[in-house]
Amino acid sequence: MRSLENHVAVVTGASQGIGRAIALGLAAKRASLVLIARNSTALHGVAECARNSSADVVLHAVDLAADGAITDIRESLSSQWDGLDVLIHCAGAFSSGDLQTASVEELDRLYRANVRMPYLLTQSLLPMLKRRKGQIVFVNSSQGLQARAQVGQYAATQHALKAIADSLRDEVNAEGIRVLSVYPGRTATP
């Protein structure tokens, strides 16, 4: 198992599910971690597990969809590290229901969490990722490849996330930045 000591990884949605599993996997390889999630209690639990093997764990218990949160995180990271090695987007929101009755407010909530937040966080941290020729991972959804009934509003945000990742890949690949998209199917996460 290759060590990731001296590598800095930012993981959003780190308090549960896929984000938690990724954070603990990176901790086992001794990466320095920046864990971001809304649920402070769960995030502290993940940090406790991660600190058993990782040299450094920094927590940001914030809602990234809130205005100002991303700027605060960028400033905090810039004061601690000169660059980042990996940014993994696991945070997001889900809802289902038919398009005919889905509210615009719900669509806006999903868009803010699933599209705007990863877009702005990537934009904000890209200079730090470029310094280390880092990697950006978008944990999308199979709905980002093929939409199904009853999840139109969610699938629309996942298709938008795919477009962001595809466009970004073409923009920064020549500079040594890797942009990856992962499309898991249904998972048993809370």
Image: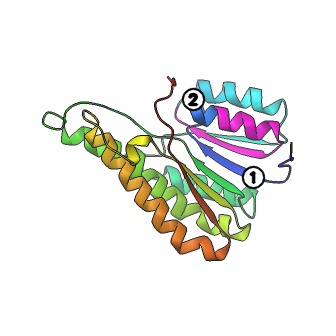
Could you say where residue 52 lies in the image, as x and y percent from the top left? 84, 29
Q: Given the current orientation, which residue lies at the most extreme left position?
A: 100
Could you say where residue 73 lies in the image, as x and y percent from the top left? 59, 52
Depth check, mark 1 against mark 2: the one in front is 2
The circle drawn on residue 137 is none
Is residue 28 inside the magenta stretch? yes
Which one is in front, 185 or 176?
185
Label 2: how many Cα within 10 Å (few below 14, some 14–19, many 20+): some
Q: Which residues are magenta?
A: 21-38
Compared across the picture, whether 151 is left or right of 44 comes to: left
Which residue carries the number 1 mark?
8
Could you say where residue 23 lies in the image, as x and y percent from the top left? 69, 37
Q: Residue at x 53, y 40 (%)?
A: 62
> What is the secondary structure assignment of the residue under circle 1?
strand
Which residue carries the number 2 mark?
17
> What is the secondary structure assignment of the residue under circle 2?
helix
Q: Is residue 114 above or below residue 136?
A: above
* Quadrant (top left, top right, bottom left, bottom right) of the N terminus: top right
Which one is in front, 75 or 88?
88
Q: Is residue 133 above or below residue 183?
A: below
Q: Is residue 53 above or below residue 84?
A: above
Q: Amino acid at mark 2?
A: Gly
**Mark 1 or mark 2: which comes first in sequence?**
1
Could you say where residue 160 lies in the image, as x and y percent from the top left? 37, 55
Q: Residue at x 65, y 49 (%)?
A: 10
Q: Amino acid at mark 1?
A: Val
Which one is in front, 98 or 112?
98
Q: Residue at x 20, y 42 (%)?
A: 104
